[in-house]
């Protein structure tokens, strides 16, 4: 998140300290509203500033903005529902995701039953197992709690 300090402390040591402590910009009072707006727009234009971090587990990675799923840097061919399910699972590290939550986020208001989540997870599980081999990325089922992406302890690193 961009940080713009607005303060009455205008001395050079104060400005330097503010920037050293992590501020992206420093504006002293009194200021003109047009200058504040211009500085905010400049902060938001900086490259990479507003990008969401990639969702990742081991060699499995998803660009949250585009939804592109990569395995060891290679794009995977997944259905939109598989991508949506992976987004939810990757976005909930080390916590099981309830079947009902997956259903709501993947199927929305469609007339699909909860068994559709089971079928989707089964297909996705098979694809991940075929890819990961010894790296051990799996979809674990926790009865009564839901599903969670896991990685074998010896493959984490």
Image: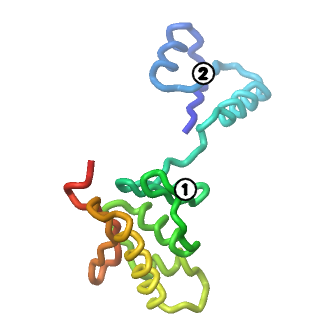
At label 1, counting other C-alpha atoms closer than 10 Å, the crowd grade (few under 14, some 14-19, many 20 or more) is some
Residue furthest top as drawn: 12
Q: CA distance from mark 2 to mark 1?
A: 31 Å
- The residue that disc 2 covers is 26
Q: Nearer the viewer, mark 2 or mark 1?
A: 1
Question: Residue 94 in the image: x percent, y percent?
Answer: 31, 62
Q: Nearer the viewer, residue 10 or 108?
A: 108
Q: Nearer the viewer, residue 151 or 102?
A: 151
- The residue that disc 1 covers is 64
At mark 1, the secondary structure is loop
Which is more N-terminal, label 1 or label 2?
2
Q: Pointers 2 and 1 in contact (CB under 8 A)?
A: no
At label 2, counting other C-alpha atoms closer than 10 Å, the crowd grade (few under 14, some 14-19, many 20 or more) is some
Residue drawn at the location 74% of the way across and 32% of the way down: 37
Residue drawn at the location 56% of the way across and 59% of the way down: 68
Question: Residue 124 in the image: x percent, y percent?
Answer: 43, 75
Residue drawn at the location 60% of the way across and 43% of the way down: 50
Residue drawn at the location 41% of the way across and 57% of the way down: 60
Q: Nearer the viewer, residue 129 or 45?
A: 129
26 vs 16: above or below: below
153 vs 53: above or below: below
Marking on residue 87:
none
Which scheme is used to colour this image of the protein? rainbow
Pick the quarter of the image with the N terminus.
top right
Left or right: 115 in relation to 134: right
Residue furthest right as drawn: 34
Question: Residue 142 in the image: x percent, y percent?
Answer: 27, 78
Question: Residue 38 in the image: x percent, y percent?
Answer: 75, 29
At mark 2, the secondary structure is strand
């Amino acid at each position: 998140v961009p940080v713009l300090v607005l303060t009455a402390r205008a001395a050079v040591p104060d400005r330097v300290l503010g920037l050293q402590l992590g501020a992206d910009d420093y504006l002293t009072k009194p200021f003109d509203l047009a200058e504040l707006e211009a500085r905010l727009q400049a902060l938001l234009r900086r490259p990479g500033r507003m990008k969401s971090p990639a969702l990742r587990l081991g060699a499995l990675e998803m660009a949250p903005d585009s939804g592109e799923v990569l395995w060891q840097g290679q794009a995977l061919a997944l259905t939109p529902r598989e991508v949506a399910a992976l987004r939810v699972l990757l976005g909930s590290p080390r916590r099981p995701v309830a079947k009902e939550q997956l259903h709501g986020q993947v199927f929305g208001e469609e007339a699909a039953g909860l068994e559709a989540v089971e079928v989707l997870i089964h297909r996705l599980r098979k694809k991940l197992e075929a890819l990961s081999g010894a790296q051990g990325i799996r979809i674990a089922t926790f009865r009564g709690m839901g599903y969670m992406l896991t990685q074998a302890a010896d493959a984490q690193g």
